[in-house]
Image (tube, grey):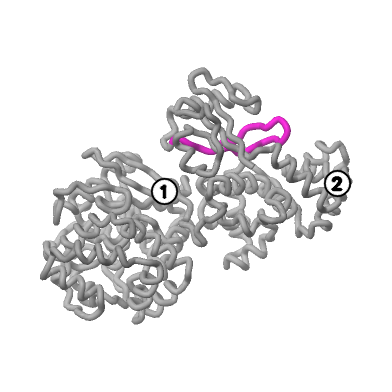
Amino acid sequence: MLRIDNIDVRNALPGSAHFDTDWRVAQVERLSTERDGWWFETFRHPSFGSTIALVGRSDRLRPLLKNATWPEDASGSVLAVVHVDWHWLEEQLSRFAEDFAFSSATTRTVVALFMTGDVRRAADEARISYETAREYLEKARALVGASNLQRLVTMMGMGLGRTGEDAEESDQFLAIAYGVSERQMRIAGMIANGDTRAEVAIALGMSEALVKKEMAVVYAALNITTAPALARAMIELRLLAIAASLGDGAERFPEPAHRTLSIGARDGRTIAASDYGPRGGTPVLVLHSSMTSRPVNRALVEALQNSGFRPISMDRPGFGDTPAPTDQNGEAYFALAAHDIVDLCTAMNWQRIAIVTRGAAQIVLALHQAAPGLIEAAIVTNPDPDATSSSRRSGFLATMKHNFVKRPWAVALMARWFAQSLTYERAADNVMRSTAGCPSDREVMARPEQMADYYRSLSSFRQGRLDGFVTEQTALATIGRPRPVDGTDQFTLLVGEHDSIHDPGETLEYWRQVLPDARVEMIEGAGRFMTYSHADVVVAALAAGLRKTNARAAA
């Protein structure tokens, strides 16, 4: 199913006759500027036309293609070009045609449609008239029961045992390769599978006009103009994804498509980040809570992308894949986390950045003090007060935080116990218990895809990476209330009406005293999982904050 061809970087000679000189030289030159060491590209296959390929250094591609058989000469000095093995696919197409008793003329026409993605071009390839080509394709559609031509192409390419529905978990390659949003990726997959715009609109709860607009973005990204061409492109991406172990055995609810970033911190550490795209969106930094790490839930990712934003998240020191020095505690730790954000912004060439947080108020405050001009707008959801200032004593988490005040040394012990017992079932049970008093939280976290997102954000804890959690919880238990900070009118703090840990009224008053210039408001019906249940409210607050900042700058 998969073919790996090599290009020797030293002399740019091909390991295969598939690639013309200009194309392969362009790939070698791109290597010197490509940050991640791999990329998607298209080349003209002599028989099958425009072909999608995964290109890059073999050492960077190997982790993506765990099930692939690599040529012996694939070393660090070799560029690997990974694409669908068209000889294999041609055999599959022939077998498909035989199974459905296509005539030889129909087979030629259908294969030509698969090669070109366009009926008129298929007619030219098969050397028949356009009307005859339409007739043959209608016969083929009727024989296989395909509702339209793109469904025919998808069924042919994926085979009877792997229709588009079975391959949808592989569609993340579309978002990774071409920088489209989660919604655009989902729409493209449905159209490639044979759904009409009207059916997509009903399924996703949007207008046909919006579906058409989103499809125009996908067509432009892929440089295609027809639904059959989309189906053909999706086949290549799906087959690459399946071969890359992103299809078979994939999570039922995979994380929204993203690219992993590795940024050098000023002290030599590596900051891990995730870029959810699309590349043309306005960057927004998403900060995780002290109880989670950088994976962002799908509700917030989609709400941000649908409003023109490009969510990018990062692990703070000691969380996930970002290491932490051993000698940074309390205020010094918050300052270190702020410096990491500054380093990320510097690496990404951001002069200013909008921020959305899940908790992490102390981190945003430290960033404001370290780089006062960097924050364009900040939406802080469910900001926790320090543990000594909260009067609530009921509930497991609230009681635990108060115990930390008396016994800070217990944070590490509790964290290790919590991590060792953190099965999916236990995590889900804890969430359902903690959301008992908040209908919106309970409803949204009862959805398996949302619970999967939350459990994924706990993955680093399950793997024993607890330094960040211990340090932040210890700091919240010991540093006390911050002094009032002026000049924070770009901050908006959203407090849920329901909270299993803190009293919402106390939290409002606490932050109004600490940040007298900020906007602090309670969101009716929301709880601790506000970014899941009220993602649109959070994004609307971000848009309003940016408008306010821009108006002030214009004045």
Hey, which quadrant is residue 365 in on the image? bottom left
x and y, in percent, of residue 463 in the image: 33, 56
246 relative to 431 in the view: left or right: right
Q: Amino acid at mark 2?
A: Thr
- Tell me the residue at 48%/69% (across/down): 448
Q: Amino acid at mark 1?
A: Asp
Q: Relative to 416, is 89 above or below?
A: above
Q: Relative to 3, is 6 above or below?
A: above
x and y, in percent, of residue 381 in the image: 31, 65
* Label 2 secondary element: helix
x and y, in percent, of residue 212 in the image: 63, 56
Q: How many marks?
A: 2
303 relative to 270 in the view: left or right: right
199 relative to 520 in the view: left or right: right
Numbered label attached to residue 30: none
Q: Report the span colored magenta.
A: 37-53
Can residue 116 be seen at all in this image of the molecule? no
* Label 1 secondary element: strand
Dot 1 alpha-carbon crowd within 10 angstroms: few under 14, some 14 to 19, many 20 or more: many
x and y, in percent, of residue 430 in the image: 34, 74
Which residue is the site of mark 2?
A: 106
N-term mark: 1 or 2? 2
Please check the rendered image and state whether residue 7 is part of the magenta-colored stretch, yes or no.
no
Which residue is the site of mark 1?
A: 275
Q: Nearer the viewer, residue 261 or 411?
A: 411
Dot 2 alpha-carbon crowd within 10 angstroms: few under 14, some 14 to 19, many 20 or more: many
